[in-house]
Amino acid sequence: MDDLPLIRRAIEGDERAARQLFEKYQLRTFRLALGLLGDEADAEEVAQDALTYALLNLRLYRPDLSSFSTWLHTITVCRARDKRRRKFLPSISLTQWLGLGNQIRDHTPGPEAVVIHNETEARLLWALDQLNPRLREAIVLRFYTDCSYKEMSEIMGCSLNTARSRLRLAVDRLRELLGEEQVPWLATETLR
């Protein structure tokens, strides 16, 4: 859905339009922040801060440069980086984030499937914890917010080639740590 009509109305002072933008992006922004920070309270603070900033500064948004979601994701990633620096977090844990049901699950698995799924998830969480924050950002943006490489480069503040490189390095490192048979979605990632 095109956000420009809502954005224009919000800029003109329509509080209902601003509320609609907030509601549309609230969960998405929170999930991104939680994926980057791993702490629910910090993620809530960052998401709230990013959304508030975006809505108060809608006049700064340039639709000719990026989509609104890309602009908001950029703000969110910057706020998460600032929060991480302030807390001196050495690594980002996705354990809580994945535990909140944000991944697709088979809700009718048998006992063996549950054990295999839990073991796979635990190994994935361990492997994600081994990545440095920049590589982890690339994985979260690509696989948890479904960003394109162009959006990733805009959000991470780097060139398109750097975004591709970070994702390739992250995927290669996860393959090295887990093996392709452990996490099948790694095999489907094409770096185009």
Image: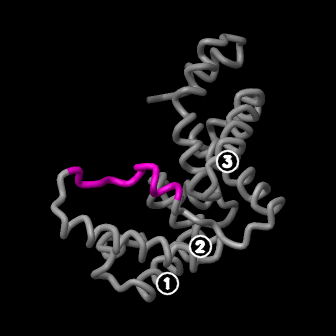
The image's colouring method is one colour
Q: Which residue is mark 1?
A: 173
Residue kind at label 3, given as amino acid type: Thr
Residue for badge 2: 135
Q: Tell me whether the residue at label 3 lies in contact with that at label 2, contact meaning CB atoms closer than 8 angstroms.
A: no
* 97 drawn magenta: yes
Picture coordinates of residue 79 (x, y %)?
74, 50
Q: Is residue 15 in the magenta section? A: no
In-image side of 187 versus 97 (left or right): left
Q: Residue flagged by tag 1: what amino acid is it?
A: Arg
Circle 3: element type: helix
Q: Decide: few, some or many residues near mark 2? Use Cα within 10 Å; few <14, some 14-19, many ≥20.
A: many
Question: Judging from the image, what secondary structure is the residue with disc 1 in?
Answer: helix
Q: Main secondary structure of the magenta part?
A: loop
Decide which of 144, 5 is in the foreground and name it: 144
Q: Quadrant of residue 138?
A: bottom right
The magenta region covers: 96-107
Which residue is nearer to you in this view: 60 or 76?
A: 76
Residue that extends furthest to the bottom in the rendered view of this protein: 176
Residue at the disc numbered 3: 76
